[in-house]
Image (spheres, rainbow, N blue to C red):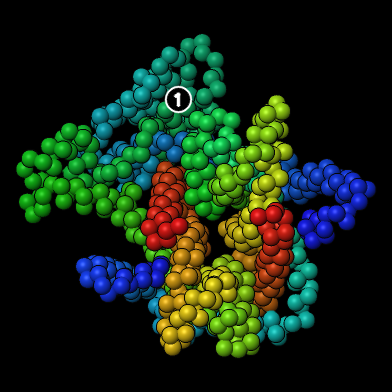
Amino acid sequence: MTASPPPTAPPPTAPPMTAAYLALVRRRRLYGTLIGVLFVVLMASGWRTADARNAGSFFDGIAHVADFPIEILSEAARDWANLPGYLRQYLPSLIETLNIAAVSTVLGGLLAAVLAVLSARALAPLPWLVVPIRRSMDVMRAMPEIVIALVLIFLLGGGPVPAMIAITLHTAGALGKLFSEVAENADLKPVEGLASVGAGWLARIWFAVGPQVAPNWSSYALLRFEINIRASAILGFVGAGGIGYDLRTTLQWGQGRYDQVVAIFALLFLTIVLVDHLSDRARARLVQGGRPA
Amino acid sequence: MTALATTPALLLTRAEICRRLARRRALLLAAPVVLLVYLTTIFFSFDLPGIAARMRPENAAVLLGDFWSFKTHVTLDRRKPGLDVAIEGEAKGRYAPAQFPGWVRDGAEPRIDLPDGSRVTYVAQGAVIERAGFGVIRVSRDGRQIAVTLPEGAANPDWLSASATRVDIRGPWWRFSMTPARTETLRYEPGWELFFFDLQSPFHGKSAAELAALALWQPRLEPERSNLAAMAADIWQNRMWRHGDVAWALGETVLMAFLGTFGAALIAFPLAFLAASNFSPGRLIRLGLRRIFDLFRGIDGLIWTVILSRAFGPGPLTGALAILLTDTGTFGKTFSEALENIDEKQREGIASTGAPAVAQARFGVVPQVAPVILSQVLYYLESNTRSATVIGALVGGGIGLLLTQAIQTQKDWEEVSYYIVLITLMVMAMDSLSAWLRARFIKG
């Protein structure tokens, strides 16, 4: 796992250096081997532990991995004529899932932008706030959405709002960190230029930092949108509305209704692939075409 | 924007520039309006006005109270003999009759001292509540009828609610209730009770100084092991908080993330060579692999979880495999992109010495891509720790399972908050570990 190639050997006329070099190479090899052995041991014992603590073992299950997909696909193939109807039936749920992701990305992104300029060292109007804001972003980022969503479902009842709040908070933390890294790397000359003509803090941020960070910020926000679609589908599964909730309901109906499960899988899959593709292209344009390097 | 970059600036007339600026300004002004319209639509489609009706503020009160306090139930049930004193009313928090806390005096007429100076006495056919600053309230039970007698001349206070079959009195830090079948007093105290030692442990109720003395020089409570070992074992096996199980669950979650991430990296690395345009043996293999990567990435972790848990049942293996499959797709894509971006000169240099393909890859390619790949894998290790919590909640493994179980009971909120703190700390620790490893292995 060594990251760089061994340095070029010194000329043979310097025997002490050769010896030192060889010793260095030997030590590196030793460390490399040790890390490799440790890694193999961890992997092997890890899989064994996971296997032992799982309800079904790997080798019993592997033969049946295809059973469920085959079952649902054969049901869907048998009742293929229903599929277009189901696709249309679950479209509103899909839109709700997408809406949850979009609103959380927008609100979380706006919150992240504020937190980012407040916590970027060179731009922060109140330097003593930098560290507390960074720590709170760390906490927001570290808390999985499901934790907040489950607690909020208890308080607010099911539906899209708990998922929206949960994903918004997580997005604010995750994007806040990336945004502030971008903002810290922004060129400060335009800021100084604006300051020299007496512009206030808000004007300096808006006109001097804004245009510099906009392409990267939007690119990160788009990437986050992709992630949030997946998160919003999962939160639906624990009761927060959208297509995940429908998936859980149809799974509970069990055999005979698997054509609906297939329809939901298909909608989810196509959406994710489509959004990934579109956002990939948009991000490539933003980062390469937007800002001269 | 792209047009500006590709068209030579000199060809743009002043009018053209003005037109573009005007368009940009219009766009800039339109964006907030569009956003506002969208958010307003969402406001109604998510039924935010109706959320006030669906909201359950009493749940919030329960939750907030439970986060930082606990209650002890002192219950007299007509169908069971004797007084029952139990923390949170749970069997595992029940005091033995000889060990009742000091504020409960057991006897023919049990007396309970409450934090604000009030006092409740359970008498035959009822109870007497001496409320501080109010007076004596008598609650008497006759068959299935319950009657309340307030002090002379007192108006019915708002902290008392009474019907023919139920009386409920709330005080600061306590609550009294009586139904035909049972009389119960709840006493609230701040903190997480029995966090270290449960009631079965001989170390319960000892102060820190006493515990230190026991651990360091006092004689063994159990002859076969030292007091320190006994303390550690008692904390580990605490029946209320199950520290041992929680530690295992955290370990399982990290294990899922570790196995999933590195397993995916090990599978994706060789495949990435086949999918990179400059290494691939054939166009067909390359395109086929790319589509497979897209497929694995597009099938969300949620779908993988559903499919895999049918075959393997709940547990950490299912979670690890779900992470592994999703990330194989992601890694396959990013690794092959990293391989396509290498500097070919290094490989050509090695090839010119007559080295075979494997040696070319080892010395001409791997050193170039290793930093990129390693930093990606380490980054995913951290983010997968979070995913493993979520997937654990779905497949039933690790800390995610404990969390959902605790939330479903709707009363163990102190455990929920404990797990939330632990999860947050675990993710932050993995974040630091991954940052440290990245700094250690990838210089520059």
The answer to whether residue A69 is left or right of residue A53 is right
Q: Which residue is drawn at 21% across and 34% down?
A: B207
**Amino acid identity at mark 1:** Gly
Please identify the quadrant where the N terminus of chain B is shown: bottom right
The answer to whether residue B152 is left or right of residue A196 is left
Q: Residue at x 49, y 70 (%)?
A: B369
The residue at the far top in this view is B153
Q: Which residue is drawn at 69% across and 81% down?
A: A76
Chain containing the residue with disc 1 = B
Residue B200 appears at what percent x and percent y?
Answer: 23, 47
Please identify the quadrant where the C terminus of chain B is shown: bottom left
Image quarter of residue B72 = top left
Q: Is residue B111 above or below residue B441?
A: above
Q: Which type of secondary structure does the marked residue at label 1 adopt?
A: strand
Q: Nearer the viewer, residue B132 or B333?
A: B333
Q: Which residue is drawn at 45% across and 15% down?
A: B134
Q: In this view, does B280 lie above or below B404?
A: below
Residue A259 appears at what percent x and percent y?
Answer: 68, 77
Instruction: State how many labels appear.
Output: 1
Mark 1 packing: few (<14 Cα in 10 Å), some, or many (20+)?
some
Residue B347 visible in the current orientation: yes
Residue denoted by label 1: B171
Q: Nearer the viewer, residue B43 or B83?
A: B43
Q: Which of A2 and B419 is in front in this view?
A: A2
The answer to whether residue A218 is left or right of residue A26 is right
The residue at the far front in this view is A13
Residue A256 appears at what percent x and percent y?
Answer: 65, 78
Residue B319 visible in the current orientation: no
Q: Nearer the viewer, residue B310 or B34?
A: B34
Residue B67 appears at what percent x and percent y?
Answer: 44, 39
